[in-house]
Image (cartoon, rainbow, N blue to C red):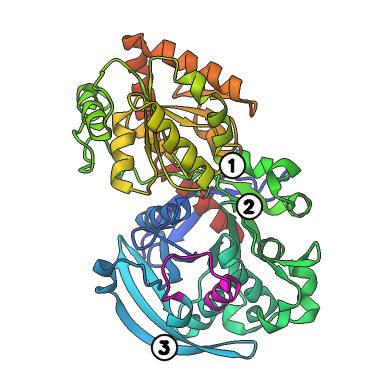
Amino acid sequence: MATTKTTAKKTTAKSAAKVTESKATVQTGDKKKILFVASESTPFIATGGLAEVIGSLSKALAATGRFDVRVVIPLYSDIKKEYRDKFTYLGNLYVHLAWRNQYCGIFSYEKDGVTFYFIDNEFYFKRPGCYGYYDDGERFAFFSRSVLEIMPFLNFYPDVMHCHDWQAALAAIYLKTNYCFREEYQFIRALFTIHNIEYQGQYSLDLLSDLFDIYGSYQYLVEYNNSINLMKGAIECCERFSTVSPKYAEEIKHAYYAHGLDPIIRNNEFKLCGILNGIDDVSYNCALDSHIFANFTPDDFSNKAVCKKELQSMLGLPQKPDVPIISMVSRLVSHKGLDLVTNIIEELLQEDIQFVVLGTGESHFEGFFSDLARRYPDKLSANIVFNGDLSRKIYSGSDIFLMPSKSEPCGLSQMIACRYGTVPIVRETGGLYDSIKPLQNGYTFSNYNAHDMLYVIREAIADYKNKKEWTKLMYRAATTDFSWGNSAKQYESLYLDMLK
Ligand code: GLC
């Protein structure tokens, strides 16, 4: 059997989860088995960055040839029909959860070397959207229990079960409180990745056995502040846990960022690490993207002017090539730093700029931008929709991308903007801090302060006038390596380390 060498990383004395260089030998044909457990994945269903990471990281790991990567998500009725029609029905079983006994159909689909499984139960998942129902706890408990129950059916017991966010937390909890006592499950290691610590899956303690089917003797694992906290439970039960940038892994040890979980994070920091997300650089490629008005490359940005002109015309803004367009593609919620923007926008609009917003969210922000667009029709365009096609037209057609988040576990938009030669201005937090370096590929500010932000925006507007230097900055932004290559290697090292 042929043998391939690969680079792996192992723990240091300082932090058990810190990744350093070492070597591991992987036998071809003896791939490590990784099962992603998540509530969404591109290209099937997406409400945010989580889905992009599940879709693109699984693909990048499979592409190494060293992993058998499979992903399991619920079969929501919103999964696009073009895909649904191609799924293969594998069979069904019944899943017990406390007194419940629910049908669980299993469908599968292969894409880019990754096997996707879909858990079918119409009572739980035949509804519009993914979340926001009164029984979300029960829906994702059923989903998580199903993940463990389908393993014998599929005859697939992963080496690492990689659970993402609170919706998949119970898979790690059930593994450690129940299944690992069975022979086939005993070697499965659990990795839990926090994409956003704000959403923890908190429920009344009364539901412990009746809904979540957790024995009283394990209450201590999931109990936090007199409630059930599923994210806390997964952190306690997993062998390792991670976040989606190194900076965020540091930040969540502090109360300002941790939404109450900082003591738990600090107690478990020996098993924590942060790995920066990548983006799908084939999909986000200004030279090939068919959604944008004209293609261009970092060596020749001339067609970016066409993208800008067409964008201005589409959004009803005056076609002024030399006026910088500052854009935001964001959920309109306060942790994205919207209060900073609302604070200074009238001042900013006194400058010779155009401002474009795309996104939906809290109604007071939606109303605020719609109102501004009415008052400044020649300067501001508010697009209160979620529209992937338009987002690409905005990324490619604008000059400056604003992302002043209060907290940002990783953030993908700043990387996507860079790929289209649109220079980001970010606050130095989480993945924004790790991906954008001042004057290297963007602008940054540190304090969560509206006028600090305005100062940096004005700096960028002034620099924009120096076309030669600005083009160099665009080039550096567009050629920054945000591919999964490096991050996938770090996950690979983490998995191998967990399997020692
Ligand atoms: C969440 C985070 C975002 C991150 C994404 C993918 O949506 O808020 O910062 O990029 O997950 O990990």
Looking at the image, do the residues carrying marks 2 and 1 touch, with CB atoms under 8 Å apart? yes
Q: Earlier in the sequence, mark 2 or mark 1?
A: 2
Disc 3 residue type (three-letter):
Asn
- What's the residue at 32%, 32% (across, down)? 420
Q: Which residue lies under the disc numbered 2?
A: 198
Q: Is residue 368 left or right of residue 65?
A: right
Task: Work out how far the residue at label 2 is from the one at label 3, CA to CA, in angstroms.
Answer: 35 Å
Pointer 2 local density, CA inside 10 Å: few below 14, some 14–19, many at least 20: some
Mark 3 residue element: strand
Q: Toward the viewer: 243 or 10?
A: 243
Which numbered circle lies on residue 167? none
Quadrant where the C terminus lies?
Answer: bottom right
Where 399 falls versus 161 (above or below)? above
Q: Give, as a three-letter code, the residue at label 1.
A: His
Rendered image quadrant of residue 408: top right
Q: Which residue is mark 3?
A: 92
Write the residue at 44% across / 24% down.
441
| Pair 2/3: label in front | 2
Mark 3 crowdedness (10 Å alpha carbons): few <14, some 14-19, many ≥20: some
Residue range in magenta is: 125-143
The percent coordinates of residue 345 (x first, y second) are 50, 25
Q: Residue at x 36, y 46 (%)?
A: 280
Instruction: Label 1: state its secondary structure.
Output: helix
Mark seen at residue 335: 1
The quarter holding residue 466 reads top left
